[in-house]
Amino acid sequence: VADLTPMRWWGWGDPGRSTELPATALTALRAELDVPERTVPPVALEDVRLSDPGLSDRALAGLRKAVGEEWVRQDRLERVTHAAGKGYPDLVRMRAGTVEHAPDAVVYPADEDAVRAVLDVCAEREVAVVPFGGGTSVVGGVEPLRGRMEAVISLDLARLDHSHEVDTKSLTAVLGAGLRGPAVERALGRHGLTLGHFPQSWEYATLGGWVATRSAGQASTGYGSIDKLVTGLRCVSPTGKVKLPGMPATAAGPGLRQALIGSEGLLGVITEATVRVRPAPDVSHYEGWMFKRFEAGAEAFRALEQGHVIPDVARLSDEAETRQALSLSDGASLAQRAGRTYIGARGYAEGCLTILGFEGTRQDVDSRRARARGIMRRAGGLPLGAAPGRAWLRQRYEGPYLRDALLEHGILAETLETAAPWSGLMRLYEGVRDAIAGALQARGTPGRVMCHISHLYPDGASLYYTFLAAQQEGAELEQWQSVKAAACDAIVAHGGTITHHHAIGRDHVPWMKAEVHKHGIRLIRAMKAEVDPGGILNPGKLIPEHT
Amino acid sequence: VADLTPMRWWGWGDPGRSTELPATALTALRAELDVPERTVPPVALEDVRLSDPGLSDRALAGLRKAVGEEWVRQDRLERVTHAAGKGYPDLVRMRAGTVEHAPDAVVYPADEDAVRAVLDVCAEREVAVVPFGGGTSVVGGVEPLRGRMEAVISLDLARLDHSHEVDTKSLTAVLGAGLRGPAVERALGRHGLTLGHFPQSWEYATLGGWVATRSAGQASTGYGSIDKLVTGLRCVSPTGKVKLPGMPATAAGPGLRQALIGSEGLLGVITEATVRVRPAPDVSHYEGWMFKRFEAGAEAFRALEQGHVIPDVARLSDEAETRQALSLSDGASLAQRAGRTYIGARGYAEGCLTILGFEGTRQDVDSRRARARGIMRRAGGLPLGAAPGRAWLRQRYEGPYLRDALLEHGILAETLETAAPWSGLMRLYEGVRDAIAGALQARGTPGRVMCHISHLYPDGASLYYTFLAAQQEGAELEQWQSVKAAACDAIVAHGGTITHHHAIGRDHVPWMKAEVHKHGIRLIRAMKAEVDPGGILNPGKLIPEHT
């Protein structure tokens, strides 16, 4: 049975769960960021302002015929939970009860043929279709914009949740697009396998969403981001189905699999993917290190990658993020207080916390750990043992809950990310950090700007920023927009990619031209015109309407 | 100064070099394949039948203006050397002096702007443009077909031979498309680096050609095929330039880099690429192994890959190829005769020769070798020491010369290749082998059909076939066509890709629909219509004219 459990409509995750900030951390944040003492609770569901569904009777009848009457939903909760993803501006709007764009219906196809039938109805009736996986987009990727269409539906793929084939000899699996992270791991776990794909949104995000947004997970340094894991896929558009079987490699023309990975619903609805899987690890070892300076840690990471000693997880927090990690931590407090003393005594008090994770067979993990240890020490790293690794693992999916708790107290909490070659990484790091800080300052809300490196490649790495500030009451969205724009402009100016793993969605569209230039956009548009001549698929996302 | 040294026009490689078959091998082949004793020399250059160049005066003037008068060539040698690649049917035709399609001119642009200027002239004057790198295509990729155009030029990119930037920190390089293999390694070698891309055509093939055809080299199991090495590229088409900078990773929409890799000149002229490079290896160790059966060797390879013990070179010959390797060998004869005795004594006489190559630092090579040794032994492998590895290295670029020598004696020698997931590899292996043997038999020319595995992936591997037979005198092309078709049909029927690293070109077009289906072809065609509305770029290649 498909897992249709929705997330909390106004925020992240399990509605039954509440997350509060540690009181000391909240007090410190209020003081540092000059946040007035207030709580800003979300409105009640019935107070969300929602226009009536605008689907024509014919369209509605067609959709009901395509998927079955019970799978076309127009109730308030369905429409509201499918009205936005989980980006900061989405949450600000939802909590305030201002849903700018709600779907006219939420449609749940059972299989690929039903997807095709829905697209036929929508193409005929001029209804925009927004594919919806876990609804976890933080860049507006699932916002139900209708573009030039008459109406818009959210196409929830939760029922495409079959594990079609597990090939234990080739270590591949054919999986339905609607499987959420835990369901993917359950399906593979029955065969002793894992996908190794664990983005922070893992508990809710789906395989299809990962493929459509070119996702990377926390362990993608080792397992490879989703574009490295997908060897085949099926994709349905208004003009037909693209079927590309799983293949270890091919020289048969342009890389169509890769052209569909990252297509964000504009080139079709991804219904299933063939993915590379691995034996579930016998051993998982996570450990902490400290570096005196961010750059020294980055150099250690470069040495690991270029020396072919690849950890599965590698994270290096800058000084600001490390300070927060050490102050916010609660659980393992004893161990960590002890750790802090040790760190201070060794002269690493203002340093940079690093997590390395190794997964696999005992022999493989031991061998990589031993070699990594040598490289890390030579680069100036101080080993902290396993406690920080365990602490990180415990809270790896907590970030989004924490953000809700911050919003509850009127604190802006946002993340954004980029990547660049090693030779330009420190310039990019400083440029974007300073741009975010400067933009917050300019709004009169000076912030805490933090960064970590989280994905390593032989030729470069990703940077992931988190920033906190007092919300500008009554101008929350303008405040966010000005900081976001400053950060994106700085990314472009310093040679980074506009997104390493959050995708383009709605929010990054203005920077897409800088990323792939006019002719790259024309290539995407040409493919789109071929597979979606009516322009019903996810309008307003990925590419600008006009170049 | 650009390296414009052409290959021997009627065959492979250095015109100053002659290759003869060992007399005993020739005698044995003649007996086995029932080849009449004859020599079939190529015609003289002046006897090649060549129509007059058909470029209009205006087109010619435009081209001369675009690249300079001296860089528009119409002499016999230029036209003939650019009239075909080096596939078997190409060689059969060239040796007989029947050039079906010669370019009306050979044009050598100096840089990207000159490429653009040439395309402008050709778009205006309806002249087809066939990009030409090393001219080593074995699938007809550089044949100057004009399609619906008035005339056709071969666009030789040899002058785009600059090494634009070597980033020793990020381990990347920006290289001109026209650089041949040795020039690539020279440019990188000055910085102590290597690309690690060594296809059999390496001495003549160019970087741009590798990118355009999604090339894999002999060491690509370790270094990665060209699509894994390219992180950015520039590509010029009649409607503009696509510029995608080198980036370690990005989630900014569809994978346009990968959509242009393998585009075979249809989506633009690749002018430069950013590639991942590595430190030149301190140590190169190549060694031989024997397996009693092909399948046992394949299982050993699977265990290496899936156990993350990746050799840089991994080749497993089947029994037939092993027999030929042991009988054709001359040079290291003493060592090999000794080896044969040893192999026979251990019960591996009818076995499968395996080459493993490891390159890198001493520590890295030793570590991988030690782990590989355990896996190979457990899978039933018999170590043969370094001699077979050295022998393989010595003759790694000799195959094409040997083919000329066989043609000289009326012997068909052809290769083709595929790849598939591990779970279907043995079925595919047998199916294609039997199809080739059956088709040769059906022509009355029973052959020797051999195969090796040469590229490993966690989820599968490539198969590379070589087959020899007596040429059917007077029906050489029909003979080839019937065998080629049988092999390709068998590849499709058994779930292989139509090409793992030779690309589509002219010869594989009929199977492209089976590979990417109608809608995959429509996607390629849509991109092509956008960047090349006049259809001047490499007509008749990659995709069928009509679906």
Image: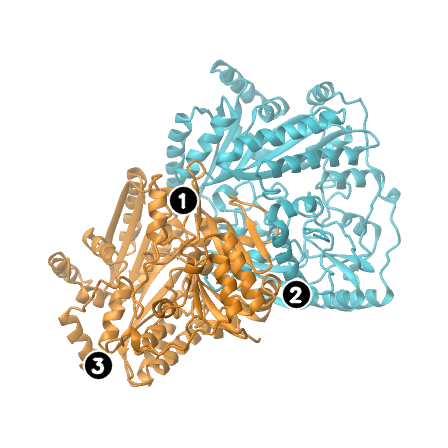
Chain colours: A orange, B cyan
Say which quarter of the image contains residue A496.
Answer: bottom left
Q: Secondary structure at mark 2?
A: helix
Q: CA distance from mark 3 to mark 2?
A: 53 Å
Residue B85: x, y in percent?
A: 72, 45
Q: Residue at x 37, y 52 (%)?
A: A2
Q: CA distance from mark 3 to mark 1?
A: 46 Å
Q: Which residue is mark 2?
A: B530
Say which quarter of the image contains residue A278.
Answer: top left
Q: Secondary structure at mark 3?
A: loop
Residue A271 visible in image: yes
Q: Secondary structure at mark 1?
A: loop
Q: Residue at x 58, y 66 (%)?
A: A124
- Check the residue under mark 3 and report the chain it is in: A
Q: CA distance from mark 1 to mark 2?
A: 37 Å
Q: Residues within 10 Å of mark 1 (few under 14, many from 20)?
A: many
Question: What mark, if any, has residue A277 been given in the picture?
Answer: 1
Q: Which residue is mark 3?
A: A35
Q: Residues within 10 Å of mark 2 (few under 14, many from 20)?
A: many
For the residues labelled 3 and 1, say whether their Cβ atoms are less than 8 Å apart.
Answer: no
Residue A458 visible in image: no
- Check the residue under mark 1 and report the chain it is in: A
